[in-house]
Image (cartoon, rainbow, N blue to C red):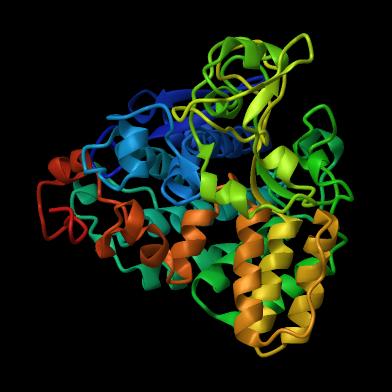
Amino acid sequence: MKKIIYIIAVTAMFVVSCSEDFINIQPITTVDVKAVYKTDKDYQGAILGCYKSLADQYQNFWIFGDLRADDSEAEAYKGNIFDYVNNFTLDNTGDVLNSSWRNYYVLIARTNALLQYIESADINVVKNKELYIGEAKFLRAVAYFDLVRIFGDVPAITKVILEADSYQAKRTKVATIYSDIIIPDLLDAEIKLPQSYAATDIGRATKGAAKAMLGRVYLTQKDFGKTEAKLKEVTLMGYSLLSNFKDLFDYSKNEHHSEYIFDVEYEEKAGSGSNYTHNFLPRISAALATYGVLGQGGDSNGPSKDLMAQFTATDKRKEISFATGYNNLQGVYISFLNDVVYSYTKKYITPTAIQDNSKANWKLIRYADVLLMYAEALNENNKTNEALDVLNLVRTRAGIPILAGLNKDETREKIYFERRLELCFEGHRWFDLVRTGRALQVCAPLGMQAHMTLFPIPLAQIQVINNNEVLPQNPGYQ
């Protein structure tokens, strides 16, 4: 076999085979790829490897989606990567940049390999061929969507490539990646994916997930007509808001409920859990003990004082979105009295026995998000009364007054505000600010400069390519 790389000129690409719970990863140089990809089970193992890559990357996604913006703070730590992201002093040497770039291209390489080799597979042997294609394209679209939102133009690779070719993989314009990869992949995925799965496969990508993500893509492109049409389809698929907002974050209950559309899935077992519970709780042993969490807190992703001040006393989301103290084991409330650590979000708390091995999922997209995007599109399409009706579904569940009689501009601001409260600490705030053109206005007081709507290309990647015509740095970070 010729050597194939998984990431722009870094290391050999990996293919995957299925084990009982995890994916065994072997370098391409020791495996004949065509020998690996034969049966339906082989391809099932390959697609599970793709999901594993997504889970690996989403351990850090909050750093981009939440910590970068105004609602989240690195309260306790100064002079580290969290602080640099938070105060807009991050340069191109940040480890999180290189690891994220690498993780996304691992995912892309795995989906590319699966899609290439499954093309000639006999449907009588690989009975779930269309399903695996749909899942791979959904996951590849998610990877590229995140990459262009984080880094802007990136190399567009849609097939297994040779090492020599990887050094010539130039950055592709964002618009081309949308038109040639992200949108076509999601359109094909929504055709091939099922509306639901049997119990043993719940958690895999569905038709509704593809449609909802496609709506988010159209909204990001400001194509409000297509956004409205696509998200209307999602509203007719049987999804509904849970009656109790707190149940969304009660991990003792079924996470695959009526509001669930697609999560990045984690299990409480070694190697497959998330780090959110530990990362987001305070570094106070008594607080962790109260919640049945063994290990050490991370004091990360702390709610800002400005965000907390936006919740009214009657807002039912307030209690679970943040806290400024805790009840100790004797039931006595202990308030944070210092300015170093003064808050934490409760959205990811679940009893956890092993450090960074929580069963708390990451909600990539849920129905309330769809409704708010749909309301935004309706309003931009001059259907403001309809938009208010949809917006009020979310507000009613939150226990706050419904809105009526607003004009288009007023409604737009109310939808933006509702997204801020409803979806805080779920990775949306930064990307919402950027796509709506408000990032600099909101974040300039925190240190943001105009070029910082994008993150820098990792220095390690630039050094590997060592060709400014192939992989130049983003403006402002040279």
In this image, 284 relative to 60: left or right? right
Instruction: Residue 393: give x, y in percent of width and height.
Output: 83, 65
In this image, 165 relative to 290: left or right? left
Depth check, front residue: 225 or 461 = 225
* Residue plotted at (51% across, 30% down): 16
Depth check, front residue: 415 or 368 = 415
Query: How many labels were placed on the picture?
Result: 0
* Residue plotted at (46% across, 33% down): 15
In this image, 329 relative to 253: left or right? left
* Residue plotted at (68% across, 54% down): 422
Depth check, front residue: 470 or 45 = 470
Q: Is residue 359 above or below residue 2?
A: above
Instruction: Residue 358: give x, y in percent of width and height.
Output: 64, 23
* Residue plotted at (37% across, 23% down): 30
Q: In this view, does 18 lie above or below 318?
A: above
In this image, 315 relative to 306: left or right? right
Instruction: Residue 186: give x, y in percent of width and height.
Output: 59, 63
